[in-house]
Each structure stands twice: as structure tokens, then as C-alpha cells.
Image (cartoon, helix red, strand yellow):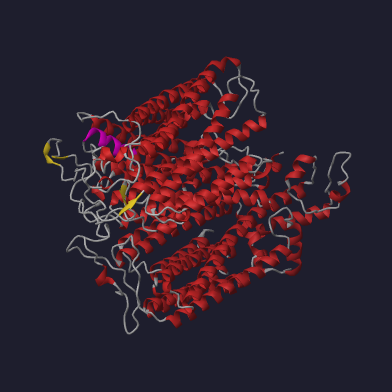
């Protein structure tokens, strides 16, 4: 192995000796199903999450097709309600929340920290199976009858009146919550206790900070949603009354408890993506992240602020308007740490040697789309405009800009960035760029018109609308198909790369980070010798506080294996 | 980085019983492993705190809104049984703490005995809960479709004619007064659709469905003022009992999970399972059990002792 | 700041004090137990005494009952659950949940300040007809 050049390795397929890594160490199905290796669990999560994403995307496609004509002719009212609920439930509980933490976080976090595995590997596997069980339950509920409450399950419609599979869907969300709790718990302990010698909190990559903040939100928020949903199930199946206005209960209490989790959940979805963007921007600008401490603290600030703004989802409910005022002001405050991040990323790229790789294009997409999503959020957090915009397509466009433009773009960016590490292969860079551009253009074509049509008064969750809105809807549907193609492309070229891709060295992007010091794909226990961290995070050059170069990086950039497997080899 | 673990094996043993902990592959030394487990367990308990916290919040909200209803409805709960259950749970908590102590000192027989005692206490707790639940359900206080506050009030006031707690506060008897008034004036009447065969059944008085959704939508119901006021009271009482059953029920589920965990541990100790060499599993279950105790410490005064 | 928390990376830098989890004595457990029993008696006795007659505010009973319950819970957390001898990290995580539950109390501000005063003396829909 050591004598063969990388080029030779890519070309000769028969009888190549490959070093023992986590993928080829064992080959049985059982060794995958019962693995406790965080990397294999991440791969299994990747498959499951992708399935959920494609199914949710299918539902989105049905919605868009239905909306091309003003008096929808493809779906009945009931079916339309069920389709948009399916889209919301699948995308939020089974894609957006687990995507970055459970796939990328699971794979990269222990590598980044220089640990052999997460603190509780078996809990990690349990988390995957709990997620799978929830996914099966959710799909069973959606396929076997459907749910028509919307993903928010507002009472009393969900608890009394809806005649669909509400209870089973809610149980699926409940179970999925436990899966993310297990993952979050694992990450928290890992970050606290498993960092390599020398890796202090402020030498950690910002992705690890993002994972920590996310995990804290998961730990503090998810149980509240779980118990709230459980109460709805009890109310629905046993006839108990807690949120039922008929006997004096308060449905707004449900909304309070629901959004106490579900607003922070927005940060569960987007903070990990922001973490990914940190890594990519630094690696592609070859510079230290500008204001590292500020970005780290802004991550924690978002986690804390995220918990005290939930009321802005309820401006149009019977919530006290005085409290609404407070929530409005607090919501504006969240913009501050988010803006800190955006500005610091922009400043990082300033005078950096920016490389336009495909994952960097995705990251650019993130920056643009998330900024638009964040700024339109300000319209929704001001009381007066929100009364006009509540439950219109303006809201739909806003949260798609944040969720798809933020989380999905961040996920794809991270997947492209770490794909060589995960599989040991390079994908086709040209196709990667085509996909990134298609997603960006398709996304804007889909959702920019929705801002307009929403402002004009198109309510969400309706499939009949005045004919004058049709132009906007047709544009949106057209964009959705471009977007769909953009999302499908990676499936093909990434899978293609598994067999035909060039071998990736340890550090194909010449990035700083412990994960790039081990071989690609990594050994089962990640590092043969545990690394000792002597460099700052993102130390592309040793910099003075004013930004000038002081000396070369202390990070071992050599593509020759630093901590590679030396003695064990297997035939493939 | 060489392994530091050698010096840390059996660091916690004292006296003549040494215990050995196994180091999992992902950890460097036993200190790191032990603290990871403890922090992990606490992080899990944080989720449990939030889990019950949301319920306590709902409880407090409705208590503030409907204090009189709470005051009146809580008389259906048995303070004696509640106190006994608190005593049982506190004692089980002590034995759980002691079992952790002896596990750290490697005294297996004592650990198994103390765990067994904890388990017995847990069973006792569930037994007492069973007695309480059955009597509530028989009185018609299970807040499902068959919730029947009228029946429960009648039975209660027959048995507790000079009830001390109920007579002190005149406002604590709203529901009972309205019920009697409604019965006395006998102005209960229902207008049902002509072809409704259930009319006769409904007119017979206080049927089960005082507040079911079907009544409100299926037919127009005209009630006497007293009956209407009673129905409102019954609805609020239904909220109280819903919260009571949800909170104590969830707590009961936690007790059952604790029983399962402790039984597993006892079996591990009796069969000399290798994992029983480590005191960490017991420490984890102990932490969990103390948390169950803490929930009850708050539940008891909030549910049983409203004054 | 950069040198990090003492409990941070699994292996503290050379020379840094390693925080250990210490284990208490038996007498502490029994002492805690009897304190808890005493507080249980206080709780129950308090139920039969109407403090609002002594001090002119109806809330005394519940406030004192909650204080007693909190003391009990703190005793269990510190002594039975060994947080007292735990590291700073354990203290942090032991406290976090209880603090965060209080944060949910923001919900009460909503009910306090609703312009519709019926929020506190709620009337069900049937009552409004």
C-alpha cells in the first residue's frame, strides 16, 4: 500500500490491498446491524434520513402539482390536508432534526475531538433503532390513512375532532424525540469528557460548539414536546381533558408547551448546519474563523435566546398582547447572534484564498438563503406586520428559507465536505457544482414567489385560491422541480463515487482538524495513537491578534499518513 | 499518549473488599469513564425534570385558574394513603442509597438485600396506588368518557356527612350545592331532535355524559341554570382528575421501570454476572430512583394537601 | 480561559488538580433519611393548620409547603444522589433542569396579563351562551 501511488490505487480494481478501515473491517450484515461504531451508525442514519427526505420531497412535489391550478383538481380536500401534513411531519421530525447531528455529527464529532468513539456507543445504536421505529410508525400512520392536522397537532382539532391517524403519528413524533434525546445526551458527555489532550474548549472546532448547543437544546426542550404530545394522545384515546375548552381547559396552553419545544427546535435544526458552515468556510478560505470566540458564544447565545421567544408563534392566538410585545422584542434579539455569525463568516473570507469547491458553493447558498430567511423573520416578529402575515405563504417562504436554505444546504455542504473522509472516495466535482447551483436557483424560484403571494394574502394550507395568484404558484412549482433535480443529482454522483471515485487521501481539502489527520476512511477506532492537540482551531497559519501571519501552522498537513494504519491489510 | 488506566483500577475499593471496574475501549481511564456515566445520567435526569416540569406547569396553571375546584376535588384523595406512600418511597430511597454505598465497597450480599428491600417498597407503593386508583375508578372519577362527578359527589357526601375539611370553607362546596339545587328544582330538560331515540334516556337525569362532545354537537341541550353551573364545575373537576391521573400515572410508570431495572440488577448480583463487578449500574439506577422519589416529594403536597 | 475547565478533557494537564467523586459516610444517609421523615411530618401537619388565619394571606400554606418540598428535594439531590461530593460538572447538570423548568414559568405572564380578565376566572363556553 505504501509503495503504490494514489493514482494506481484508483485504476486497478482487482486484488488491491487496502488498509483495514471501519468499512472493510467486517462485512456481514450482522456486523452492521449490531455495530456500535459511531461511523457505521452515521452511515445507517444517512440512509434512513435520505429515505425520509425523498418521501417528504415526494409529498412536497404533490403539493406543488396540486397548487398549479386555482381550483386544485388532483387531490381532494382531505387528501391535500393529509399530503401537507405528511410533508411537514416527515421533513421536520425525520429529516431536519436528525439530519446534521445524527449523520454528520455522529460521524465527525468523535474524530474532531480525537476520541475513539462517542461516550455511550450502545446508546448511540439504540438511538438509531428508536429513530427507525419512529420512522416506521410515522410512515404507517401516513400511508395507512394519513393525518390531517398539520405537523403542529393543534388542539382541540387533533385531540377531539380529526378523524385521521393522529394518535399513531403523535406517538411516532414522541418516539423520534427519544432518539434525538439519546443522541444529544451522548454528544454532551462526549464533548465534556472525551476531548483529546490539549483540546481545550476554545481549541475545539466550532462544529463541536454547535453540536454542544444543539444537544443542550434537545435535552431541555424535547421532553416538553414529548409530554405535551402524550397528553394529546391521552385526551384523544381515553377522553381525558386537559386542553379541551369544552370543560374549561385552555388550548393555548397546548400552543405554549408545543412552541416551548418547537421554537428551540428551529435552532436544533439550524445550529448544526451553521457549525458545518464554519468548517467549510475556514477550510476553503484557508483562514482562521474571524472572531472565533464570538462565533462560539453566539452559538450558545442562540441556544439560550431560542428558549425565550416561543410566543412569537402565537401573536394571533389569545395570548396576552403585552407578553406578545416582550416576545417580539426578544425575537429581534435573536437576530443579533445570528448576524454575528454571518458577518464573521464574511470577514473570514475577506482576503482569504477562497476556493470554489462544490461544498463551498453549497455554503455560499447557505449564506444567501439563510440571510434572506433570517431577515424576513424580522417581519414576522414585529407584532403589527405579523397580524397581516400570520398563516400566509409569507410564513411558508420564510421558514423554508431558514430550514431548506439553512439546514438542508448545510447538510449537503457537510456531506460533500466530509464525503471523502466517510467513504475514502472523491465524487465528481463538476456534478457537485451543477447540483449546488441547481439547488440554489431552483430554491429561489420556488420560494421567492411565495413571499409575494403570501404578502398578497394567499393563506397557507389552502389549495383553492383566486386565479390572480396562479402565475406565482406556477413559478413556484416550476422552481420546485428544478430544486428536486438538484437534490436528486447527489444521490447519483455520490453513489457513483463509491465505486468509481478517485481515492481520497487523508486530507483532500488540506483542512485543519483532527478528522483530517486520520486515514480515509478511518480505522474502526479512529486513531491508532490518540492525538495531542498543539494547534489552535483553524490554524492555517499562526496568526497574531491583528491577523498578520506569524508562522506556519503547527497542524500536520502532510498527506502521508500521520496516524494511519501501518500493519494490517486486507484483500478486497 | 500512554494509557493512564493502570493506576486507576479499583481506585474506589476500600477495606478488604476490592471491586474491579472494566474500562470500555472509548475511555482513557476509570475517572473519565465514571464521571461520563454520572454526567450522562444527570443529563438524562434533566430531560426527566423537563418531562414532569411541563405537567407541573399545567397543574399550577389550572390550580391558579380553578382553585376552588381543586380544593373541593382534592378531598377525594386519601391523605393517609398518600402519606404512607411518601413514607414507603422515602424508605426505598434510603435503601437505594445504601445499596450504592455497599456496591462501592464490594459487599454484594448487602447490595442484593438492600435492592430487594427497595423493590419491595416499590411494589408496596404500586399496591397502595392500585387501591387508590380502584376506588377512584369505582367512584366514577376516572376522567374518561364515563367521568361522573355527580355520582362521586353524592357518594362522598353520604359517607362524609360532617366532613371537617369540606365544611370549613363555604366556597368549597360549589359543585355539591349546585348539584343538590339542580336535583331539587328538577329543571333538567333536554330538547333533542325529534327522531332521537335517546331522549328518554337523557331525560332520566344525570347520565354519564355530563360533558361529552357528542352532546354539544348532536342535539340542542337546554339545561337549568343550576345544572349548567354544576356541569361547569364538573368540567373543571375533570381537568383536576385528568392531571392527577396523568401525573401519578406517569410517576407510576417510572416506578415500574425502576422495579424492572432493580430486578435485573438483583439477578445480575445473584448470578455473579461479570457486569456486577462494577458499581456504576447500581449508581445509575440509584440516581434514577432518587429522582422518582423527588417527583413524589412534590406531587404529594400538591395533589393531596391542597388547603 | 484557554486553559479550559478543570474537568474538561478526560485527562487534565500535568499538575492540574483532578476532581474526584468522593463517597460519603453511612451516617450521612441515615441523617438525611430522618431529616426527610421530619419534614414529611411538617408537611402533613401543615395541611391541617390554616395559616391564612394567623397571617392575613391565603398563600402561606402552599408557599411553605413548597419550601419544605424543595428542602426535601435538595436534601435528596445533595446527599442521596451524591451531588455534594461531585465535580463542578455534576453540579452544573444537576441544577440545569430545575432552573430551566422555572423558565417555562414565563407562560404565567401570559395568563396574568391577558386583557380578557376571565382568563383567571375562566368560564367555559357553555357559560357564555
Q: Nearer the viewer, residue A398 or C92?
A: A398
Look at the image and say whether residue A284 sits in the magenta stretch.
yes
Q: In the rendered image, which quarter contains the N terminus of chain B?
A: bottom left
Q: In the rendered image, which quarter contains the C terminus of chain B?
A: bottom right
Outermost residue on the front side: it is: A14
Looking at the picture, how far across and down is residue A269, in whole percent? 43, 40
Q: Is residue A20 visible?
A: no
Look at the image and say whether residue A274 sits in the magenta stretch.
no
Outermost residue on the bottom side: it is: B16
Looking at the picture, how far across and down is residue A221, in whole percent? 46, 49
Q: Nearer the viewer, residue C89 or A485?
A: A485
Question: What secondary structure is the stretch in magenta mostly built from?
Answer: helix
Q: Which residues are magenta?
A: A275-286
Looking at the picture, how far across and down is residue C85, in whole percent? 32, 69
Looking at the picture, how far across and down is residue C117, in whole percent? 57, 41
Outermost residue on the left side: it is: A550
Q: Is residue A523 visible?
A: yes
* Above or below: residue C19 compared with residue A507: below
* Above or below: residue C48 compared with residue A373: below
Q: Quadrant of residue A84?
A: top right
* Above or below: residue A412 compared with residue A257: above
Amino acid at each position: 500500500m505504501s509503495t503504490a501511488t494514489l493514482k494506481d490505487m484508483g485504476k486497478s480494481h482487482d486484488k488491491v490491498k487496502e488498509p483495514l478501515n471501519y468499512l472493510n473491517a467486517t462485512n456481514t450484515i450482522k456486523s452492521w446491524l449490531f455495530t456500535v461504531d459511531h461511523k457505521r451508525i452515521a452511515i445507517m442514519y444517512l440512509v434512513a434520513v435520505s429515505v425520509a427526505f425523498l418521501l417528504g420531497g415526494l409529498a412536497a412535489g404533490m403539493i406543488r402539482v396540486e397548487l398549479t391550478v386555482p381550483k386544485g383538481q388532483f387531490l381532494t380536500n382531505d387528501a391535500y390536508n393529509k399530503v401537507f401534513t405528511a410533508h411537514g411531519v416527515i421533513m421536520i421530525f425525520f429529516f431536519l432534526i436528525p439530519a446534521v447531528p445524527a449523520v454528520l455529527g455522529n460521524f465527525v464529532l468523535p474524530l474532531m475531538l480525537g476520541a475513539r468513539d462517542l461516550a455511550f456507543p450502545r446508546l448511540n445504536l439504540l438511538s438509531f433503532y428508536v429513530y427507525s421505529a419512529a420512522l416506521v410508525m410515522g410512515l404507517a400512520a401516513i400511508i395507512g390513512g394519513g393525518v390531517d392536522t398539520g405537523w403542529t397537532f393543534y388542539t382541540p382539532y387533533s385531540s377531539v375532532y380529526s378523524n385521521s391517524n393522529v394518535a399513531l403519528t403523535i406517538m411516532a413524533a414522541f418516539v423520534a424525540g427519544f432518539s434525538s434525546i439519546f443522541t444529544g445526551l451522548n454528544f454532551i458527555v462526549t464533548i465534556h469528557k472525551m476531548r483529546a489532550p490539549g483540546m481545550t474548549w476554545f481549541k475545539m472546532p466550532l462544529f463541536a460548539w454547535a453540536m454542544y448547543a444543539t444537544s443542550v437544546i434537545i435535552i431541555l426542550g424535547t421532553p416538553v414536546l414529548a409530554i405535551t404530545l402524550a397528553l394529546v394522545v391521552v385526551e384523544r384515546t381515553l377522553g381525558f381533558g386537559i386542553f379541551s375548552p369544552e370543560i374549561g381547559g385552555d388550548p393555548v396552553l397546548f400552543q405554549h408547551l408545543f412552541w416551548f419545544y418547537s421554537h428551540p427546535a428551529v435552532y436544533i435544526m439550524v445550529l448544526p448546519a451553521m457549525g458545518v458552515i464554519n468548517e467549510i468556510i475556514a477550510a476553503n478560505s484557508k483562514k482562521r474563523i474571524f472572531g472565533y470566540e464570538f462565533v462560539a458564544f453566539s452559538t450558545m447565545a442562540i441556544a439560550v435566546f431560542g428558549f425565550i421567544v416561543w410566543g412569537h408563534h402565537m401573536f394571533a392566538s389569545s395570548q396576552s398582547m403585552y407578553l406578545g410585545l416582550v416576545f417580539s422584542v426578544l425575537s429581534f434579539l435573536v437576530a443579533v447572534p445570528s448576524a454575528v455569525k454571518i458577518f464573521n463568516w464574511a470577514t473570514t473570507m475577506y482576503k482569504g484564498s477562497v476556493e470554489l469547491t462544490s461544498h463551498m458553493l453549497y455554503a455560499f447558498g447557505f449564506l444567501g438563503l439563510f440571510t434572506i430567511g433570517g431577515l424576513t423573520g424580522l417581519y414576522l416578529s414585529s407584532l403589527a406586520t405579523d397580524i397581516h402575515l400570520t398563516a400566509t405563504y409569507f410564513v411558508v417562504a420564510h421558514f423554508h428559507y431558514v430550514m431548506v436554505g439553512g439546514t438542508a444546504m448545510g447538510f449537503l455542504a457537510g456531506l460533500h465536505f466530509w464525503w471523502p473522509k466517510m467513504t475514502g472516495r472523491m465524487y465528481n466535482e463538476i456534478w457537485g457544482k451543477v447540483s449546488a447551483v441547481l439547488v440554489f436557483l431552483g430554491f429561489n424560484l420556488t420560494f421567492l414567489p411565495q413571499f409575494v403571494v403570501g404578502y398578497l394574502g394567499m393563506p397557507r394550507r389552502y389549495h383553492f385560491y383566486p386565479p390572480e395568484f396562479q402565475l406565482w404558484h406556477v413559478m413556484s412549482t416550476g422552481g420546485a422541480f428544478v430544486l428536486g433535480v438538484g437534490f436528486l443529482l447527489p444521490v447519483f454522483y455520490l453513489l457513483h463515487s463509491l465505486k468509481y471515485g478517485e481515492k481520497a487521501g487523508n486530507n483532500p481539502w488540506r483542512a485543519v482538524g483532527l478528522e483530517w489527520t486520520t486515514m480515509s476512511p478511518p480505522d474502526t477506532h479512529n486513531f491508532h495513537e490518540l492525538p495531542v492537540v498543539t494547534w489552535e482551531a483553524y490554524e492555517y497559519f499562526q496568526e497574531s491578534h491583528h491577523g498578520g501571519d506569524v508562522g506556519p501552522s503547527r497542524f500536520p498537513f502532510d498527506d502521508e499518513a500521520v496516524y494511519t494504519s501501518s500493519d494490517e491489510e486486507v484483500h478486497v | 499518549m500512554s494509557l493512564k488506566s493502570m493506576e486507576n483500577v479499583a481506585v474506589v475499593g476500600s477495606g478488604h473488599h476490592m471491586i474491579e471496574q472494566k474500562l470500555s475501549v472509548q475511555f482513557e481511564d476509570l475517572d473519565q469513564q465514571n464521571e461520563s456515566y454520572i454526567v450522562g445520567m444527570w443529563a438524562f435526569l434533566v430531560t426527566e425534570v423537563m418531562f414532569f416540569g411541563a405537567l407541573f406547569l399545567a397543574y399550577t396553571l389550572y390550580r391558579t385558574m380553578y382553585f376552588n375546584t381543586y380544593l373541593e376535588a382534592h378531598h377525594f384523595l386519601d391523605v393517609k394513603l398518600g402519606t404512607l406512600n411518601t413514607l414507603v418511597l422515602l424508605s426505598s430511597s434510603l435503601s437505594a442509597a445504601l445499596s450504592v454505598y455497599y456496591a462501592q465497597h464490594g459487599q454484594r450480599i448487602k447490595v442484593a438485600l438492600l435492592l430487594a428491600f427497595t423493590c419491595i417498597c416499590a411494589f408496596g407503593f404500586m399496591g397502595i396506588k392500585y387501591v387508590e386508583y380502584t376506588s377512584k375508578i369505582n367512584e366514577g372519577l376516572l376522567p374518561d368518557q364515563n367521568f361522573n362527578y355527580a355520582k362521586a359527589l353524592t357518594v362522598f357526601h353520604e359517607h362524609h356527612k360532617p366532613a371537617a375539611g369540606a365544611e370549613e370553607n363555604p366556597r368549597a362546596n360549589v359543585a355539591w350545592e349546585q348539584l343538590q339545587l339542580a336535583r331539587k328544582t328538577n329543571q333538567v330538560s333536554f330538547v333533542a331532535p325529534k327522531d332521537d331515540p335517546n331522549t328518554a334516556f337523557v331525560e332520566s337525569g344525570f347520565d354519564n355524559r355530563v360533558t361529552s362532545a357528542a352532546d354539544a354537537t348532536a342535539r340542542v341541550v337546554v339545561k337549568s341554570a343550576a345544572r349548567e353551573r354544576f356541569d361547569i364545575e364538573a368540567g373543571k373537576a375533570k381537568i383536576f382528575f385528568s392531571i392527577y391521573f396523568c401525573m401519578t400515572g406517569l410517576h407510576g410508570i417510572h416506578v415500574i421501570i425502576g422495579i424492572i431495572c432493580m430486578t435485573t440488577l438483583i439477578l445480575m448480583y445473584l448470578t455473579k454476572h461479570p457486569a456486577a463487578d462494577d458499581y456504576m449500574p447500581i449508581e445509575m439506577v440509584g440516581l434514577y430512583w432518587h429522582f422518582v422519589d423527588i417527583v413524589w416529594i412534590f406531587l404529594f403536597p400538591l395533589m393531596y394537601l391542597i388547603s | 480561559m484557554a486553559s479550559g475547565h478543570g474537568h474538561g478533557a478526560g485527562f487534565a494537564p500535568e499538575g492540574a488538580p483532578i476532581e474526584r467523586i468522593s463517597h460519603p459516610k453511612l451516617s450521612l444517609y441515615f441523617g438525611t433519611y430522618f431529616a426527610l421523615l421530619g419534614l414529611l411530618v411538617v408537611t402533613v401537619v401543615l395541611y391541617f393548620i390554616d395559616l391564612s388565619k394567623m397571617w392575613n394571606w391565603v398563600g402561606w400554606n402552599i408557599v411553605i409547603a413548597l419550601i419544605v418540598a424543595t428542602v426535601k428535594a435538595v436534601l435528596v439531590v445533595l446527599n442521596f444522589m451524591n451531588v455534594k461530593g461531585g465535580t463542578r460538572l455534576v453540579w452544573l447538570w444537576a441544577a440545569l433542569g430545575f432552573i430551566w423548568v422555572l423558565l417555562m414559568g414565563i407562560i404565567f405572564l401570559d395568563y396574568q396579563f391577558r386583557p380578557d380578565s376571565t382568563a383567571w376566572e375562566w368560564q367555559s363556553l357553555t357559560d357564555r351562551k
